[in-house]
Image (cartoon, helix red, strand yellow):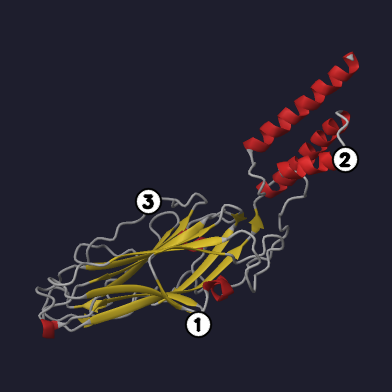
Amino acid sequence: MDECDFGQISRRLISGVLGEWLSMKRFKVEWSTGLLAVLGFGGGGECWGAAPLFSGNIMGSYAFGAGGSVAPGTQYFNVWNDSTGSFLAANNGDLWDLSITYSQVVPASGAPSGNATAGLSYDAVNDRFTMSHSFAQGNSAGFPTFNNPGTRIEGELTVRFASHISATDLILDFTSLNTSGLTWENSLIGYLKTDGTPFSAAPSVAPYGSHTTVNGSSALGWFLVDSKATVTGVGTATTAAGANGSYDNLTATGANSYLDYNDVGLPSGQVVGGFVWQYRLEDVRGTLNNSSSLSASFFDMRVGGLSVVPESGLSGRGLVVLLTASLGLLGWQRIRSRRG
């Protein structure tokens, strides 16, 4: 029995108990009904029942707007109809369903790497979020000032489901996560619990020279895309583009071309609360190299096993406590009635 089923059964029992007690106290019918509604037990709950296997690609939602640059911070989006589970074509005024938080770490301009920039944008035509990183000044401006400075630009995108949303499957897809170039591009993706924490500690990504390639999952819930063969000649005055990493577009993940539970070791049916994507560009250029700009995109998110967690504010132990108290109240009233 899941939380949705438990919530519905508990509410029906509590509603019945309170209803009988209120009738014994000779409350008017409309007063009884109103009180039950205020307490949150008047309806049958907002469980969607047998949800479709996957909700469809969320990335095309109206909620993300017309596109453009996205500033660091958190934004909230109303994507689903909380009564039916269907995609919304416009905001219907019910609860927001997911949040997206973006943050970035950009080194100061100047030595050793020159002018570094970062940004996030949303493309409403192609339905994707893109993080772009750049070390814009090459050797003509005297940067980098020495070979393989190791300067990093870091971006992080976190998607979290609201507390009333329950999801037991999550499929993600990205492109250009680990592309060849003059600098080293790598990405780390992690599934999150409902409280926003990861299922295990995040794998560390050491500087290029000392990092050991993982290219897959080395910790529960995480997937690291980190081939070092994307750039050659590191440590010399001139680096060169190598080969795209085998997971650059996630085309080699299992028997499919996207990221799912199988790729990160999560069991089937695991409830998740969202995911986090960390995107890095490390300056490994030599003193004779020019500028380097790379970007990666997140373009597909499909959520499975969707349901709405009861919104009465009571679940699990709280419902049991209230149910027990209500049954006790009813028993006490019956004893009192017999004695009277």
* SS of the residue under disc 2: helix
Quadrant assignment for the C terminus: top right
Relative side of 147 to 58, left or right = left
Name the amino acid type tagged 3: Ala
Which numbered marker is on residue 29? 2
Front-most of residues 312 and 324? 312
Residue 251 in view in this figure: no
Q: Rounded to the nearest whole Å, what is the CA distance between mark 3 and mark 2?
A: 55 Å
Relative side of 248 to 92, left or right = left
Which numbered marker is on residue 126? 1
Q: Earlier in the sequence, mark 1 or mark 3?
A: 1
Front-most of residues 282 and 86? 86
Q: Position of residue 116 (x, y in %)?
A: 23, 74
Query: Alpha-carbon neighbours of circle 2 within 10 Å: few (<14), some, or many (≥20)?
Result: few
Q: Position of residue 222 (x, y in %)?
A: 42, 59
Q: Rounded to the nearest whole Å, what is the CA distance between mark 1 and mark 3?
A: 33 Å
Disc 3 to disc 2: CB gap under 8 Å: no
Q: Position of residue 15 (x, y in %)?
A: 79, 39
Which numbered marker is on residue 201? 3
Q: Could you tell me which residue is drawn at 61 percent across and 72 percent down?
A: 56
Name the amino acid type tagged 1: Asn
Q: Position of residue 90 (x, y in %)?
A: 63, 72
Front-most of residues 266 and 46? 46
Name the amino acid type tagged 2: Val
Mark 3 vs mark 2: in front: 2
Q: Quadrant of residue 236?
A: bottom left
* Residue furthest top in the image: 339
